[in-house]
Amino acid sequence: MKKIEAIIKPFKLEEVKDALSEIGIEGMTVSEVKGFGRQKGHTEIYRGSEYTVDFLPKIKIELVITDVQVDAAVSAIIKSAKTGKIGDGKVFVSNVEQAIRIRTEEKGDSAV
């Protein structure tokens, strides 16, 4: 099993969700987060004063899937989240040792 964490632009969430749904991935956790990478934020003017916005709003999607679904899921996320502009985000893939469904106590791939 693998865990995919994707940091994307907020307005791309629906497209990513639909792309994952099309390949049969339904379950995911979505969080509103703030952060920055190479873009290092930007400056804005509010009521005549200039200030720096260091942390930009992003969406973090987390999903745990079987090993055979990983390539399709990563491709779907990249294809649907990409704008070609700085700040599109990142995708991280890591190993998951164990998954247990609380309701049925199923373990491993069947719990996912």
Image: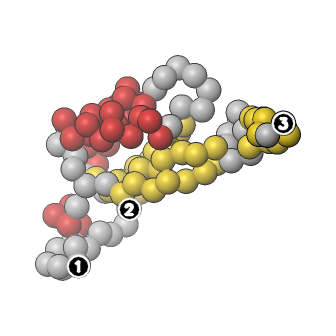
Identify the residue shown where x is 78% and y is 35%. Answer: 45
The residue identified by callout 1 is: 102
Out of 54 and 102, give the one closest to the viewer.
54
Residue 13 x, y percent position in the rendering: 38, 40
The residue identified by callout 2 is: 96
Judge whether 64 appears above or below 43 on screen. Answer: below
Amino acid residing under circle 1: Ile
Mark earlier in primary sequence (3, 1) = 3
Q: Which mark is residue 16?
A: none
Identify the residue shown where x is 60% and y is 32%. Answer: 87
Q: Is residue 7 left or right of residue 44?
A: left
The residue identified by callout 3 is: 48
Rounded to the nearest whole Å, what is the CA distance between mark 2 and mark 3? 50 Å
Residue at the farthest right position: 49
Q: Secondary structure at mark 1?
A: loop
Q: Is residue 47 left or right of residue 88?
A: right
Amino acid residing under circle 3: Gly
Q: Secondary structure at mark 3?
A: loop
Amino acid residing under circle 2: Val
